[in-house]
């Protein structure tokens, strides 16, 4: 497959941007080679600058649950843009998007719009500390909550891929109030609260992990999170930036029946435009400025274009829910991948919740970061390029989830499984 134009553009990008990219996951460090540069997307497909078409399973890392350039979303953004792109003042569109979020997400009584998932998690932990008057935050190894200094400790996502659990520039002071535990470890959680319960302001967790690959929580773990935080007066924060409106319309909390105190959102709620949100119990949210004293602000927070895209996306998910179809397509893909890996003799395990999943190159079920770290990342890299050269665009790291969109068809899934069968055969040989 010819990608000469991609190589030319990336060579220029390296002269302009650190590593040639604006986010490290895009650099292909985990799979080798040079990034593919894309020109456009439509539905379930991407086209690169050389004209090659790919079936896309990244969906811009999650937001495009309805597919690329979904007409109602594009039309909504175009209409909004004709009235102005940003006012730095309240708009009715903010109300509409916030109403959709409050109506959908069980734990959210009040919500504040921001510009990214990182801003949402940063604001949520600040609010948890301000509300409780405590300092310590518990997070879990392999969970990623954006590039917030105090949370960029044993992070997942590109930090895990690049083997940088602690970023240079993050001071000991910034991270000293962050307690790191293992995901799905109830005993470790109980021990942390026994030792530090009076210091813990909150616990932040991906209810389904997507940033060390898809890792499914145990029911006991989620129940322990809720019980121990309530018992100790700590705030339970669900980071649903990835799972919100993805695994269910009401997010993972509606799927599992566990109600956190605060929830962070992003990706789908902006319909593909930069957005984030955090919300929860009114008793806690009233502490945010100007009603309370916990500071948070943003010039472009709740901007009309992001609100328009978010409203169009969430309205369609509510009025014409695609979740049953997404489940059928995702199950078809998962079954096909497992069968293909078995035929290729590749050690594997697959984890899936709804339309997000990961094929792990490990025979051991992945429950936490230590088990994820055992995956054969070299075999994954061969698999990635085997798919890319057959017109399938997969996450460029073993430690990222893939996503199915409502724009995918059964034919797309079957073509992907056929490509995966060939790519897996190549991945099993060095």
Image (spheres, rainbow, N blue to C red):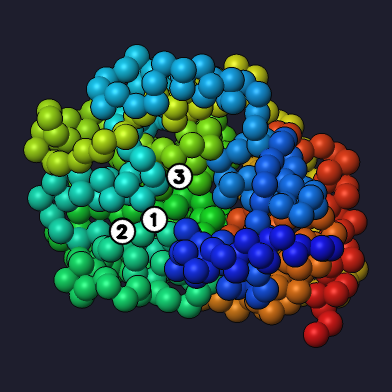
Q: Judge whether 301 appears above or below 331 on screen.
A: above
Q: Is 203 displayed left or right of 130 in the figure?
A: right
Can residue 342 be seen from the camera position used here? no
Disc number for residue 148: 2
Between the residue at mark 1 and the residue at mark 2, the CA separation in whole angstroms equals 7 Å
Q: Which label's residue is closer to the chain start, 3 or 2?
A: 2
Between the residue at mark 3 and the residue at mark 2, the CA separation in whole angstroms equals 14 Å
Q: Name the residue tied to disc 3.
A: 241
Estimate the x, y position of residue 338 in percent, counting from the top left.
Answer: 80, 60
Can residue 29 be seen from the camera position used here? yes
The answer to whether marks 1 and 2 mark residues whose Cβ atoms lie closer than 8 Å is yes
Q: Judge whether 302 appears above or below 176 on screen.
A: above
Q: Name the residue tied to disc 1.
A: 145
Between the residue at mark 3 and the residue at mark 1, the CA separation in whole angstroms equals 9 Å
Q: Residues within 10 Å of mark 3 (few under 14, many from 20)?
A: many
Estimate the x, y position of residue 232 in percent, counting from the top left.
Answer: 21, 52
Quadrant housing the C terminus: bottom right
Estimate the x, y position of residue 156 in percent, counting from the top left.
Answer: 46, 65
Q: Which label's residue is closer to the chain start, 3 or 1?
A: 1
> What residue is rendered at 39% in x and 46% in y?
117
> What residue is rendered at 65% in x and 28% in y?
70
């Amino acid at each position: 497959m010819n990608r000469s134009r991609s190589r030319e553009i990336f060579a220029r990008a390296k002269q302009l941007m650190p590593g040639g990219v604006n986010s490290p996951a895009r650099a292909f460090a985990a799979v080798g080679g040079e990034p593919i540069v894309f020109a456009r997307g439509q539905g379930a497909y991407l086209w690169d600058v050389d004209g090659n078409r790919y079936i896309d399973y990244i969906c811009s890392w999650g937001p495009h649950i309805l597919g690329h350039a979904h007409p109602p979303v594009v039309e909504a953004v175009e209409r909004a843009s004709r009235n102005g792109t940003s006012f730095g003042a309240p708009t009715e569109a903010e109300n509409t998007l916030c109403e959709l979020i409050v109506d959908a997400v069980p734990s959210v009584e009040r919500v504040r719009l921001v510009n990214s998932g990182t801003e949402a998690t940063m604001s949520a932990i600040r609010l948890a500390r301000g509300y409780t008057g405590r300092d310590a935050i518990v997070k879990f190894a392999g969970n990623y909550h954006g590039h917030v200094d105090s949370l960029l400790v044993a992070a997942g996502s590109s930090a895990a891929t690049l083997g940088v659990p602690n970023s240079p520039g993050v001071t000991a002071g910034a991270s000293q109030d962050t307690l790191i535990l293992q995901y799905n470890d109830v005993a470790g959680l109980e021990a942390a609260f026994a030792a530090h319960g009076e210091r813990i302001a909150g616990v932040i967790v991906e209810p389904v992990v997507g940033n060390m690959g898809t890792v499914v929580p145990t029911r006991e773990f989620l129940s322990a999170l809720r019980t121990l935080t309530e018992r100790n007066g700590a705030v339970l924060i669900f980071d649903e930036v990835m799972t919100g409106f993805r695994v269910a319309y009401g997010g993972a909390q509606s799927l599992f029946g566990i109600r956190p105190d605060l929830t962070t959102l992003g990706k789908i709620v902006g319909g593909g435009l930069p957005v984030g949100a955090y919300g929860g119990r009114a008793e806690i949210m009233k502490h945010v400025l100007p009603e309370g004293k916990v500071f948070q602000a943003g010039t472009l927070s709740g901007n009309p274009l992001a609100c328009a895209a978010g409203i169009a996306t969430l309205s369609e998910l509510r009025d014409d829910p695609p979740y049953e179809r997404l489940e059928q397509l995702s199950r078809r893909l998962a079954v096909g991948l497992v069968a293909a890996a078995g035929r290729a003799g590749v050690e594997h395990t697959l984890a899936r919740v709804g339309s997000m999943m990961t094929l792990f190159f490990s025979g051991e079920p992945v429950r936490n970061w230590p088990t994820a770290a055992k995956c054969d990342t070299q075999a994954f890299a061969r698999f990635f390029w085997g798919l890319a050269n057959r017109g399938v665009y997969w996450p460029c790291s073993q430690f990222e989830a893939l996503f199915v969109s409502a724009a995918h068809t059964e034919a797309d899934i079957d073509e992907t499984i056929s490509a995966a069968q060939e790519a897996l055969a190549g991945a099993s040989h060095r």
